[in-house]
């Protein structure tokens, strides 16, 4: 497409296969946008494009993401305010005609259906996590009300409790380290409302304390602690890492290799070895999957 549309707080560039969103860093720009900086959204990650009247003499162009395409929106679970939605671009009303044309062009390149997970060329394989949009690159740590949360970027989340704010229940358990491979998901409740928290969900459905302030797998938010621009990108990055661990034994782009094809199987083992050397697959996972692939010969 090649068009560029500058709006309030962001600029959208329409490339041949993706929408690139670049956020401003001005003082009036929402801090979440400043933290995200830039996002590349494949058109396959979108389900629709709309244009509607906005506030105070503006129109809003909305690129609607598909459910499950973006780890940030998956973690947010519909809790973001419209003014902090990275898929909404506010424009002066006098640019409505241009926005309408680009809305129509964007709608024309959005695929009619969701990606096919069985298609080896499908964009669902662009990220090891299975998300179509790359996870945020940071922050890797933030201060919550009762402790500090840290993520190493791939394999481990750590909670270190505050000596003054953490409950006795958390102090009794001590600081917590959570291997990503032992987690099944992330639950984020916005700090913009009372009771905000970030909870890590263990595999196996282990019962958790109902109150996040008593749960050592949770950090709670408070006034000035765990703000959206810190805690939501953190939650999205952890969620993407969890999905990547789930998918790691099967290398991206080669899941549809023909059963019994020696060349295809050798290529899958090669990719598996690359993931193993990168630390995305454990020794046990590598050995088990390699044995499984060799059995197909």
Image (cartoon, rainbow, N blue to C red):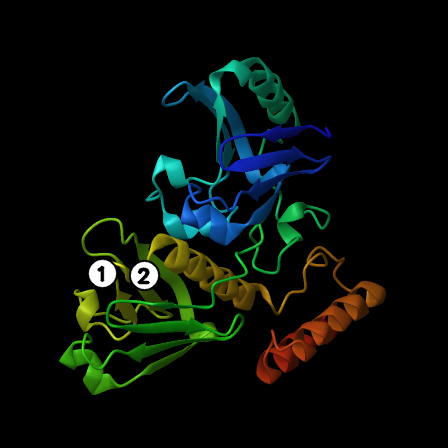
Secondary structure type for disc 2: loop
The crowding category of the residue bearing disc 1, from other C-alpha atoms within 10 Å (few below 14, some 14 to 19, many at least 20), is some
> How many residues crowd around disc 2 within 10 Å: few (fewer than 14), some, or many (20 or more)?
many
Q: Is residue 12 above or below residue 102?
A: below
Disc sitting over residue 226 in the figure = 2
Mark 1, residue position: 222
Q: Secondary structure at mark 1?
A: loop
Locate residue 203: give its quadrant.
Answer: bottom left
Left or right: 10 with respect to 146?
right
Question: 202 above or below 25?
Answer: below
- Residue positioned 16% across, 76% down in the render: 167
Q: Left or right: 118 with respect to 211?
A: right
Quarter of the image with the N terminus in it: top right
Instruction: Work out which quarter of the rendered image holds the C terminus and state it.
Output: bottom right
Q: Residue furthest left?
A: 168
x then y, percent, for residue 6: 58, 30
Residue 17, x across and y down, in percent: 70, 38
Q: Is residue 295 visible?
A: no
The image quarter in which residue 175 lies: bottom left
Give percent across and percent down for residue 140.
47, 68
- How many labels were placed on the picture? 2
- Gap in Å between the C-alphas at discs 2 and 1? 7 Å
Outermost front residue: 27
Q: Are marks 2 and 1 in contact (CB under 8 Å)?
A: yes
Q: Residue 259: x, y in percent?
A: 74, 61
């Amino acid at each position: 497409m090649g068009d560029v549309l500058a709006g309030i707080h962001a600029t959208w560039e329409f490339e041949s296969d993706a929408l690139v969103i670049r956020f401003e860093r001005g003082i009036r720009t929402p801090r979440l946008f400043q933290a995200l900086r830039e996002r590349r959204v494949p058109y396959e990650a979108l389900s629709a494009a709309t244009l509607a009247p906005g506030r105070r003499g503006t129109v809003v162009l909305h690129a609607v993401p598909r459910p499950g395409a973006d780890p940030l929106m998956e973690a947010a679970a519909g809790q973001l305010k419209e003014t902090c939605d990275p898929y909404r671009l506010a424009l002066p009303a006098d640019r409505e005609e241009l926005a309408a044309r680009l809305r129509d062009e964007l709608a024309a390149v959005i695929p009619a259906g969701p990606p096919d997970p069985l298609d080896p060329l499908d964009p669902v394989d662009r990220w090891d996590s299975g998300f179509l949009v790359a996870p945020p690159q940071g922050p890797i740590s933030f201060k919550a009300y009762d402790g500090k949360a840290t993520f190493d970027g791939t394999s481990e989340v750590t909670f270190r409790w505050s000596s003054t704010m953490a409950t006795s229940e958390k102090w009794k358990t001590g600081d917590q380290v959570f291997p990503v491979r032992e987690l099944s998901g992330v639950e984020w409740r916005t700090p913009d409302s009372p009771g905000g928290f970030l909870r890590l969900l263990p595999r196996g459905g282990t019962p958790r304390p109902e109150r996040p302030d008593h749960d050592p797998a949770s950090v709670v938010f408070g006034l000035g602690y765990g703000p959206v621009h810190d805690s939501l990108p953190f939650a999205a990055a952890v969620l993407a890492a969890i999905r990547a661990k789930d998918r790691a034994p099967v290398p991206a782009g080669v899941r549809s290799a023909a059963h019994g094809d020696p060349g295809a199987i050798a290529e899958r083992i090669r990719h598996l070895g690359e993931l193993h050397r990168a630390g995305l697959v454990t020794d046990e996972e590598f050995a088990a999957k390699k044995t499984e692939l060799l059995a197909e010969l």
